[in-house]
Amino acid sequence: MFGLPLAFTAPLVLAALATLPAIWLMLRVTPPQPRRIAFPPLAVITDILPKQETPARTPWWLLLLRLLIAALLILAAAGPVWNPPAGDAAAGRGPLLLLVDNDFAAAGDWQERMDLAAGVIATAARNERPVAIVALGGPLTSDVTMGDAGQAAERLRAIAPLPFSSRRNEHLASISAFLNAQPEADIVWLTSGLRVEEDQFVSGLAAIKGSHPVTVYRRETSQPFALAAIANVSAGFDVTVVRPTAAGRDRGTLRAVDLKGLPLGETPFAFPAGATETTARFTLPVEIRNAITRVEIVDENSAGAVSLVGDDGKRRSVGLVSGASADIAQPLLAPTYYVARALQPFAELREPRGGVAEAISALIEQQVSVIVLTDIGVLDPQSVDRLTRYVDDGGILVRFAGSRLAAGNDALVPVKLRRGGRSLGGSLSWDTPKALAPFAQPSPFADLAVPADVSVQRQILAEPDGNLAARTWASLSDGTPIVTAERRGEGQIVLFHLTADPSWSNLPMSGLFVEMLRKIVQLAGTPVTETGTASSTETVAPRHILDGFGVFSAPPATAKPVPRGYAGRATPDHPAGLYGPNEGLQAVNVLIPADRLNPLDITALAADVRPIARPEAIDLRGSLITAALVLLALDTLIAAWMGGHLRRFGRRRGAAAAAIAAFAVAASLGALALMSPAVAAELPPKPAASSTPPLRQEDIASALHTRLAYVVTGDQQVDATSRAGLVGLTDALMARTTFEPAEPIGIDPSRDELSFYPLIYWPVVAGRPLPPDAALRRLDTFMKNGGTVIFDTRDALRANGQASPETQQLRRMLASLDIPELEPVPPDHVLTKAFYLLDTFPGRYDRGPTWVEALPPAVDGERRPARAGDGVSPIIITGNDLAAAWAIGADGSPLYPVLGADPRQREMSYRSGINIVMYALTGNYKADQVHVPALLERLGQ
């Protein structure tokens, strides 16, 4: 209205503004101000004189104030809206055809589109116009039907973005039929403004629209990004990002996640000036890159901004082993040179050093997907056994012939070979070099074209048998096999009957060689037929399907399985998502690598083009009513002041005027607050009082520095011994190891946080009250979360087969805890070799055994009460009074004598303590086989 973004929901009410002149005339007269007279009776009688009074005129500024109040009330009653919702395109009288693009490109601003469409339908409802809605993103399911605005609103709520490109062309026939039946219909199109495939919708709509007016809403700025291609190359994981035009946003962030949705990495991308595509790279180790299942553009809520990665996108690891010595000075002569160059673009190569047996063993331990052997004739029995198990478990073994393989034979070939070789061409041969025959089904090379310039001069022949034809993947023009394969267990063996270098054929120097190896590597992890080839008819069912916003959801009923190896873009039958089992996922994406986002040219429609994005609509009624009430209150005060009714507040009018001014200021501030409720909403709420107790200085110190802890029992003598013992052990650790713990500390399990301490020493004192239940629960949590507690009953000297009072006290303490099964420390336990090699763990006494958690083989369904973190026992029980043996005074001398026959008992007690601390800190790493040779050497075995 008047060039402003202002509209009224009840514009007829504005006619009341014409009554303002009448209100002016009514308000011009105000009653005269009464006179105040003292009340002496005689004075009243004598002073009152009859005279004619004339009414005074209302001041012009007061009259203007009252007219403003009336105008505000009239405007508020008209329902003013600032930035009214769109819908004026539906202001006609005939039927309305609403076309909605609901492909992936419309998902980014979907809510704005739905609000706009709802505004169009609401305007049509006010004008009593029937509405027909057509969702152009999906396939045609029925003819265009028309209904009232309520039915159209229900239909609109059922429309959602779809995870594939628009199917506009399929709807032209039904739209044409509708327009022919409704000659007065108007067309409103909410378009995404983009196309991926060839789109004839605009030209088709221009041909059938005739005289029907067309209004097009589209996004003018902030065009979407999309992902077109991904490539797991040797240097990293490359992602191609595209945009429809070179204007607008030019940078963003990519995120890579795994199948569980856990982020694996992020990388920024930026478009060069004037470019519509760019490439970003994730620089990650190949193992992490192979775990990527989904790459997405951060804050871009669209299925087109997501690129899924199936098993074919993983970079397989391939091991190369050569039977010949590599000539480093002349790499072109190396048997693996051409294979490595061919595999490098799509595989991670591993070439271990050492002999053939060592290299094969190393590659199998590295769990490579494919092992390539070039001209290896004889394998030792151990290597044959390893490779046989490797293939049976799903590995792929690729072998190349050569002089060594021609002279020998083994079981790791798909067909039986003839000894020697066949020469084609040369002075001593009647034959000429042979070309390759076209590949036939079911060979995995069937879709590859054979170059005419590839020829073979020498080959190893296969012995004819009934299975030879089924195992042949490639052959020469005379029918002799050049590539054979056989399935073994879950894997397969592939043999090239020629060398991996150009000495027997120029195939290794051709592009065909690269594609053949690519096909073989892609078979890793892919189900194969009995002949060893990939199944060409296998289909995989949908597993995780993307919706239009790029979020995984359950597969819809309309989703159909895709063939294994499907490389097309997403369609209504095959929506974008992951298909097949987790161990063999097939990815279907919205865009294929060759796709690009293209702006949709709508000039042929001669349409009224309007932007989708509009400012938020603001209802002004509340603000106008509030302003009118404030001015009305101000008018009341002014009238009371002019009538002399405010003298009770003071004898001078100055005081009354000050009161009026103060009220006016307060009312204005209140009006501002009411007119801007969003301001108050933006204020941060008052923080609630925290229920977490403040951290103590002792806890902060323990969190910053690792230290040992002991439980304060309340017995002064025992507590002093515990502290002196841990001080002595701390000194020994600092002198003999790289571990430098801070000063030990006494703790109360019912009050102190236990998670700061890796090891807690708890001397058991008979007759003391049992710890409260809260302390025992905290202790149980500490042990189950990886902490270790040493319970020392200090009763080994008095042990006579009967439970001592300290042992009975310990049993009562542990009765309510979930304690694992215990056993005396076995001779091969990690505790015996964590730092020193020990067979006993003495303290002040040496008679008592040391008990730790027993870890028998897990039984199905059996619940282990306390899982030891990293193989560490959560509980250690001894009666040897460890702290007394470790205890030292201020001068560093021992405080207590040790009681035992071994003169080195105190030294052994320190070693026991060091082993226990190292065991608690490092876990069971000393159980690894890598330490066995050093341990055996130390033991003299």
Image (cartoon, rainbow, N blue to C red):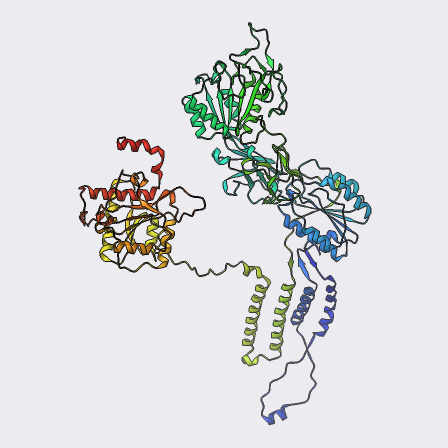
Residue 755 lies left or right of residue 912; in this view the side is right
Q: Nearer the viewer, residue 729 or 913?
A: 913
Q: Can residue 316 be seen at all in this image of the molecule?
A: yes
Which residue is at the far front? 801
Q: Position of residue 556 (x, y in %)?
A: 64, 44
Q: Position of residue 424 (x, y in %)?
A: 57, 10
Q: Position of residue 478 (x, y in %)?
A: 62, 14
Q: Nearer the viewer, residue 705 or 281?
A: 705
Which residue is at the far top? 427
Image quarter hosting the C terminus: top left
Depicted 355 relative to depicted 31: above or below? above
Q: Can residue 369 be seen at all in this image of the molecule?
A: no
Give the residue displayed 58% in from the left and 79% down from the top.
Answer: 646
Q: Nearer the viewer, residue 773 or 369?
A: 773
Depicted 907 relative to depicted 85: above or below? above
Q: Nearer the viewer, residue 133 or 603?
A: 133
Image quarter hosting the N terminus: bottom right
Give the residue displayed 70% in from the left and 40% down from the top.
Answer: 167
Snapshot quadrant of residue 172: top right
Q: Position of residue 199 (x, y in %)?
A: 71, 37
Depicted 648 relative to depicted 742: above or below? below
